[in-house]
Image: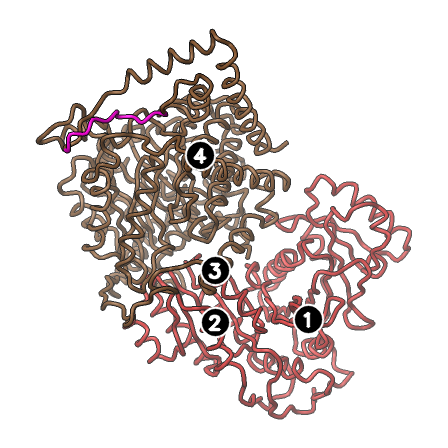
Chain colours: A brown, B red
C-alpha cells in the first residue's frame, strides 16, 4: 500500500472517528457534558471587539449551537483555530488587530500583537548581482524586518554559466544572474545575514543545492563559520513539481532527489532556522491544473518528500516543522476552501500515518494570486481579479500572501502596479472590516462545508488514482500528473474559446478599442551582460589551478554515496555553477524531459 | 556513385511545422495546448520540447524540412533569441523556413515591430484565440513553392539541407521513383528498433546515440523515427522532445508520421531508408511506432539487424507466445529490467529464444539509468 493509500484510509478513518464522537456526544451523557463544558470554555475565552461603528462582535465566530453532537463534529472535524485538524487556521489568531481596539496609533501594536513581521515579501531580481542588491536596499530602506525574495535569470535556473553558448540574451532577464560565490557575495552585500529580523527566499529548484551552497559559502566568507546556524530563509527546491509542471529540472529525478535529501539532511541538523523546501502547487496551477489537481499533487508530493527524508533517517519532528507550502489562488469556487482542506489532510497524514508531533502537522502556507487569471485586454480589470483572489486566500487563513500586479500579463511589473497590489492587501486586512475584527466569518457555514466536502472528495479520488499507479513517483514515470495537467489546460482554453468560461474583456464585453498601454520594460543592457560573462571568465582563470581538484573531490563524494551538499559548500569556492553542473551531469546524467 | 538527378518538385501532403520553447525557458503549457490544436486541424507538428537552443531548433527544422518554426517564449531574451534563429537559418541557406512565435512575459508591441523587421512573420500574444493561430499557419505555410534541389548527387558530401529536401520529395511522392541507386554502392548498416508503445524505445535510442558519438569523434548517425498520425488528422512527432544526446551536428534525424499506414512504419519508409543508406552514415537507426503483438514492421532486406524492445509487463507467458517479432528479431531487449517482473520476463523470453535455435541475443537494460551496462552491451552488439 503506497503512502497515499494510507493517507486516504487515515482521512476516512478520521471522518469516521468524528461521526462516532458526534454520536457519542448525543448518547453518552457524561461525554456530552464534557463536550459542552469544553465548548463553553472555548466561547468564554473569545474576547469581544467593538467596531468603529459601534457593533459588538466576538473575535472568533463559532457556530450557534448547543447540540453536543454538532459541537463535537465541529471541534473534531474542523478544530478551533490552531487545533487539530487545523481546518480553520494553523494558529489561534490570524489577521486580527490588537485588542482592545485602539483608537490611535494602533498600527504598531497591531504588528506587535500579531507576533508576525510585515507580511510584505519583496520580490526582485534583475540584471547583475549588484543591481539586484541595490534594488533590495532601496525596497527595504524603511522596513524593520527584511524579507528578500530572490528571482534568478534563466541560465541560473538551468544551472548554466553566463558564458555558455546561446544564452547571452538571457543573462539578467527576469531575474538576477548568479554564476559564482562572488556573485552571491555581491547579491546580499550589506545585509545582516545572521540577524533574526532578516531572511531571504530563493526561487530556484534544479540547481538549488548548488545555489544554497553558494549562499552559505558567501555568508561564511563575510561573517565566519559561526554564521551558518543563524541563517534564516527559504529555498524552493521542489523538484517533484518541476517534473510535473514547471520543467526547471536538470538532473535525473533520482539524482535530483538524492541531492535534495542531502541538502535537507544538512539544513535540518546545521541550519535549524532554514526552510529547505517550499512544496509548491503554484506552478502546477499555473500550468493548467484544476484546483483539486493542484491540491492533490501538492499534498502527494509533500508526503513523498516526508517518506524520502524519513528513509534517510531524518527525524520527522525536526524536519517536519521546516516544510512549508505555496499555493495558487484563482477565481474558481474551489478556492473558497482549498487551503482549508489541505491543512486538514496534511495534519491527518502527518499525525496518523507518520506519527508526527503537533509542530510538524502544520501546513504553513504562502499563497500567490493567480497569474494565469490575468489578461492583457482591459488589464485594469486585473485589479479586481487580484482583489477577489486575495480575499479568497484570506478566507482560507493563508499565513502569507503575494498579490500580482495588474500589468504583469504584458510587462515586468511597474512600481505603480506593484504598489497597488501590495496596498490591496492592506485594504483587505487593515481598511476593510472583514478580517481584522473577527476570525472565521464563513467557517462552518453550509456553503463552505459543501465546497469543503466536494474538494476533499476530489482530492481523495486523485490520491486513489495516484496510488493505483504505485504512488507519486511511479505516477510521474507514467506521466500521469503531466498529462492530467495538460488535459486540464487544454479544456480551459477550449472553454474560453467556446465561451463557457467567461473572461471579461476577452470573450465577453470586450473593450471597443483594445489597445495595450505603451509599456517600458526594464531590460539588462548589453554591456552588463558582457560584464557578467567577462568577470565569470576572470573567476575561472583565477581558480584554474584548483577547479579540477575541487570537482574531483565532489565527484568522489558523489560516487562514494556521501553527503554531496556538505562537499558543495567547498566546491563553490573554486568552481562556477556551470562547471559544477557539467561535472554532475557527467556523473549522474541529464534529466530526460517528458512531453 | 552515380544517381539519376532529381529535378524540382512540389511539396504536397500535410503542413509540417516545428515547435519549441527557447533555451532556459520551461513554459510549455501554451505550446502543448496549441500543438494539440494544430494536430486536430491536420497539421504535422515536430515538437522539440522546452529549453532548446537556437542551434538545436535550426538543425531540427532543417533536418525535418518544415515549412515554419513556431517558438513560444515566456522567459525574456526573445529579441535576441528569435534573431539568433533567423540568423542561423540564413547562414545555412534555409531562410525559406519561416519563423513565427508567441508568448508573453515581456514581449512588448515595440519588440514585435523590431522582430518583424528582422524577419519574424508574426507574434501572437497570450490570449489570442487558437483558431486564429491555426488559420495563420494554414494560410501561410500551407501551399509550398517548388523546392529547388541542388543537382548534387547522393554522396557523403550531401548536407543536411539537401538530404532533408530529398526526403521530403520521397515522402510526398511515394511510389514514384525519382532516383536510382546503383546496387554496387556499399551502403550503411541499418538497424531497425521496434516494440510496444511505452517500452522505452526512444530513450534507448538516445542512449545508443550517446555511446555512438562518444565511441568515434567523427562518425555520423542517422535516425528515422516514426509516430502515428491521429485518425484523419495531423500528427505529433514528439520523439525529439525527450531526446538529449541526439541533438548533435553528427546526428541526422527525421520524423515520419504513419499517415494512415498500419504496422509501425510509413508508406515512405522504404524509400527514405534507401536514400539514408547511401548518404555515408556510419549507422542508420529506424524506430517504429509502438507495435502490436502480430506486427512485423521490417520487411525483407529493409534493415540489416532488428531489435525488439520489450517492457517486462507484457502479461502472461501465453501473451509472450503471441508476439511475432520474438521470432524475427536478431536482438531482444528487456528494458526497465529494474522492475520486479523483469527476472521472470528475462527467463521466459530466454527460453523462447533458445527454442527458436536462431542464435538470437537477449539483453537486459535500464535505459533511463545513466551509464547502464546493459545499454553498453547492446551498443556493442549493434556495431557494424
Say which element carries label 2: helix
Q: Is circle 4 on the same chain as circle 2?
A: no
Q: Which of the 4 image quarters holds residue A144? A: top left
Q: Residue at x 78, y 72 (%)?
A: B302
Q: Nearer the viewer, mark 2 or mark 3?
A: 3
Q: Which residues are magenta?
A: A53-63
Q: Chain of mark 2?
A: B
**Residue B262 placement, left or right of A242:** right
Say which element carries label 1: loop
Front-most of residues A362 and B149: A362
Q: Is circle 2 on the same chain as circle 3?
A: no
Q: Chain of mark 1?
A: B
Q: Separation of disc 4 and disc 3 at Cα?
A: 27 Å
Q: Chain of mark 3?
A: A
Residue holding disc 2: B131
Say which element carries label 4: helix
Front-most of residues B364 and A72: A72
Say which element carries label 3: helix
Residue holding disc 3: A495
Q: Separation of disc 1 and disc 4 at Cα?
A: 52 Å
Residue holding disc 4: A449
- Tell me whether the residue at label 4 lies in contact with that at label 3, contact meaning CB atoms closer than 8 angstroms: no
**Residue A59 placement, left or right of B260:** left
Determine which of the numbered discs, if any, sits on residue B258 in the image. Answer: 1
Q: Chain of mark 4?
A: A
Label 4: how many Cα within 10 Å (few below 14, some 14–19, many 20+) = some
Q: Separation of disc 1 and disc 2 at Cα?
A: 25 Å
Image height check: is A337 above or below B261? above
Q: Earlier in the sequence, mark 4 or mark 3?
A: 4
Q: Which of the 4 image quarters holds residue B113? A: bottom left
Q: Nearer the viewer, mark 1 or mark 3?
A: 3
Amino acid at each position: 500500500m503506497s503512502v497515499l493509500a494510507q493517507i486516504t484510509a487515515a482521512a476516512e478513518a478520521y471522518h469516521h472517528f468524528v461521526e462516532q464522537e458526534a454520536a457519542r456526544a448525543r448518547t453518552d451523557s457524561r461525554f456530552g457534558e464534557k463536550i459542552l463544558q469544553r465548548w463553553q470554555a472555548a466561547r468564554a475565552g473569545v474576547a469581544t471587539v467593538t467596531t468603529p461603528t459601534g457593533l459588538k462582535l466576538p473575535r472568533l465566530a463559532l457556530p450557534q449551537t448547543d447540540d453536543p453532537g454538532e459541537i463535537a463534529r465541529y471541534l473534531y472535524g474542523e478544530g478551533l483555530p490552531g487545533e487539530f485538524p487545523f481546518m480553520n487556521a494553523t494558529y489561534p489568531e490570524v489577521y486580527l488587530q490588537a485588542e482592545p481596539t485602539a483608537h490611535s496609533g494602533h498600527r504598531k501594536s497591531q504588528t506587535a500583537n500579531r507576533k508576525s513581521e510585515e507580511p510584505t515579501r519583496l520580490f526582485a531580481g534583475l540584471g547583475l548581482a549588484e543591481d539586484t542588491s541595490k534594488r533590495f536596499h532601496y525596497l527595504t530602506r524603511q522596513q524593520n524586518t527584511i524579507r528578500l525574495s530572490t528571482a534568478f535569470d534563466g541560465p541560473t535556473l538551468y544551472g548554466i554559466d553566463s558564458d555558455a553558448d546561446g544564452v547571452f540574451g538571457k543573462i539578467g532577464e527576469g531575474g538576477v544572474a548568479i554564476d559564482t560565490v562572488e556573485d552571491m557575495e555581491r547579491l546580499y552585500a550589506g545585509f545582516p545575514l545572521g540577524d533574526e529580523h532578516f531572511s531571504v527566499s530563493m526561487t530556484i529548484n534544479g540547481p538549488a543545492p548548488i545555489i544554497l551552497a553558494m549562499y552559505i559559502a558567501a555568508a561564511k566568507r563575510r561573517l565566519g563559520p559561526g554564521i551558518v546556524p543563524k541563517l534564516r530563509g527559504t529555498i524552493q527546491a521542489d523538484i517533484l513539481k518541476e517534473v510535473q509542471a514547471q520543467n526547471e529540472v536538470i538532473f535525473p529525478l533520482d539524482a535530483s532527489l538524492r541531492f535534495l535529501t542531502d541538502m535537507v539532511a544538512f539544513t535540518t541538523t546545521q541550519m535549524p532556522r532554514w526552510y529547505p523546501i517550499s512544496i509548491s502547487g503554484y506552478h502546477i496551477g499555473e500550468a493548467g491544473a484544476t484546483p483539486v489537481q493542484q491540491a492533490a499533487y501538492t499534498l502527494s508530493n509533500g508526503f513523498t518528500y516526508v517518506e524520502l527524508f524519513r528513509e534517510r533517517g531524518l527525524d520527522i519532528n525536526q524536519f517536519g516543522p521546516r516544510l512549508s507550502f505555496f499555493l495558487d489562488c484563482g477565481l474558481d469556487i474551489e478556492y473558497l476552501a482549498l487551503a482549508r482542506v489541505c491543512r486538514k489532510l496534511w495534519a491527518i497524514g502527518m499525525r496518523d500515518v507518520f506519527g508526527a508531533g503537533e509542530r510538524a502537522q502544520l501546513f504553513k502556507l504562502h499563497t500567490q494570486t493567480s497569474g494565469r487569471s490575468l489578461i492583457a485586454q482591459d488589464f485594469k480589470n486585473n485589479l479586481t481579479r487580484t482583489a477577489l483572489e486575495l480575499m479568497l486566500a484570506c478566507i482560507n487563513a493563508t499565513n502569507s500572501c503575494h498579490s500580482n500586479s495588474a500589468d504583469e500579463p504584458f510587462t515586468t511589473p511597474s512600481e505603480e502596479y506593484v504598489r497597488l497590489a501590495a496596498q490591496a492587501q492592506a485594504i483587505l486586512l487593515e481598511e476593510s472590516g472583514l478580517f481584522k475584527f473577527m476570525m472565521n466569518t464563513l467557517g462552518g457555514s453550509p456553503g463552505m462545508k459543501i465546497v469543503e466536502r466536494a474538494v476533499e472528495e476530489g482530492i481523495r479520488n486523485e490520491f486513489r488514482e495516484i496510488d493505483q499507479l504505485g504512488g507519486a513517483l511511479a505516477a510521474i514515470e507514467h506521466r500521469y500528473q503531466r498529462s492530467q495537467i495538460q488535459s486540464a489546460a487544454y479544456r480551459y482554453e477550449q472553454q474560453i474559446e467556446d465561451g463557457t468560461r467567461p473572461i471579461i474583456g476577452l470573450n465577453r464585453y470586450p473593450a471597443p478599442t483594445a489597445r495595450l498601454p505603451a509599456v517600458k520594460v526594464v531590460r539588462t543592457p548589453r554591456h552588463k551582460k558582457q560584464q557578467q560573462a567577462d568577470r565569470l571568465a576572470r573567476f575561472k582563470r583565477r581558480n584554474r589551478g584548483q577547479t579540477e581538484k575541487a570537482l574531483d573531490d565532489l565527484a568522489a563524494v558523489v560516487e562514494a554515496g556521501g553527503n554531496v551538499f556538505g562537499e558543495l559548500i567547498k566546491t563553490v569556492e573554486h568552481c562556477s555553477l556551470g562547471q559544477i553542473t557539467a561535472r554532475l551531469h557527467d556523473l549522474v546524467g541529464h534529466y530526460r524531459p517528458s512531453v | 556513385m552515380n544517381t539519376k538527378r532529381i529535378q524540382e518538385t512540389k511539396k504536397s501532403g500535410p503542413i509540417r511545422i516545428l515547435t519549441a520553447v527557447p533555451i532556459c525557458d520551461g513554459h510549455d503549457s501554451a505550446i502543448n495546448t496549441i500543438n494539440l490544436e494544430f494536430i486536430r486541424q491536420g497539421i504535422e507538428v515536430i515538437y522539440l520540447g522546452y529549453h532548446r537552443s537556437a542551434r538545436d531548433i535550426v538543425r531540427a527544422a532543417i533536418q525535418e524540412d518544415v515549412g515554419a518554426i513556431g517558438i513560444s517564449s515566456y522567459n525574456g531574451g526573445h529579441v535576441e533569441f528569435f534573431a539568433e534563429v533567423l540568423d542561423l537559418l540564413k547562414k545555412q541557406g534555409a531562410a525559406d523556413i519561416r519563423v513565427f512565435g508567441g508568448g508573453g512575459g515581456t514581449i512588448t508591441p515595440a519588440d514585435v515591430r523590431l522582430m518583424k523587421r528582422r524577419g519574424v512573420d508574426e507574434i501572437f500574444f497570450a490570449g489570442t484565440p487558437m483558431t486564429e493561430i491555426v488559420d495563420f499557419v494554414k494560410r501561410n505555410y500551407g501551399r509550398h513553392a517548388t523546392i529547388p534541389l541542388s543537382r548534387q548527387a547522393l554522396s557523403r558530401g550531401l548536407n543536411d539541407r539537401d538530404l532533408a529536401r530529398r526526403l521530403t520529395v520521397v515522402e510526398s511522392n511515394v511510389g514514384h521513383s525519382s532516383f536510382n541507386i546503383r546496387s554496387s554502392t556499399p551502403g550503411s548498416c541499418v538497424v531497425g528498433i521496434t516494440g510496444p508503445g511505452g517500452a522505452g524505445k526512444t530513450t534507448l535510442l538516445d542512449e545508443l546515440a550517446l555511446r555512438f558519438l562518444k565511441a568515434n569523434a567523427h562518425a555520423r548517425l542517422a535516425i528515422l523515427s516514426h509516430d502515428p498520425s491521429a485518425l484523419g488528422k495531423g500528427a505529433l512527432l514528439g520523439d525529439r522532445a525527450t531526446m538529449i544526446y541526439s541533438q548533435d551536428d553528427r546526428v541526422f534525424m527525421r520524423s515520419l508520421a504513419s499517415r494512415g499506414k498500419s504496422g509501425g512504419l510509413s508508406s515512405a519508409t522504404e524509400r527514405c531508408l534507401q536514400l539514408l543508406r547511401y548518404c555515408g552514415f556510419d549507422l542508420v537507426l529506424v524506430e517504429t511506432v509502438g507495435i502490436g503483438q502480430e506486427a512485423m514492421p521490417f520487411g525483407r532486406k529493409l534493415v540489416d539487424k532488428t531489435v525488439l524492445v520489450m517492457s517486462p509487463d507484457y502479461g502472461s507467458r501465453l501473451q509472450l507466445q503471441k508476439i511475432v517479432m520474438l521470432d524475427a528479431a536478431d536482438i531482444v531487449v528487456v528494458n526497465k529490467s529494474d522492475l520486479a517482473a523483469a527476472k521472470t520476463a528475462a527467463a521466459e523470453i530466454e527460453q523462447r529464444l533458445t527454442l527458436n535455435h536462431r542464435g538470437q541475443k537477449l539483453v537486459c537494460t535500464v535505459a533511463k539509468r545513466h551509464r547502464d551496462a546493459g545499454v553498453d552491451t547492446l551498443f556493442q552488439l549493434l556495431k557494424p
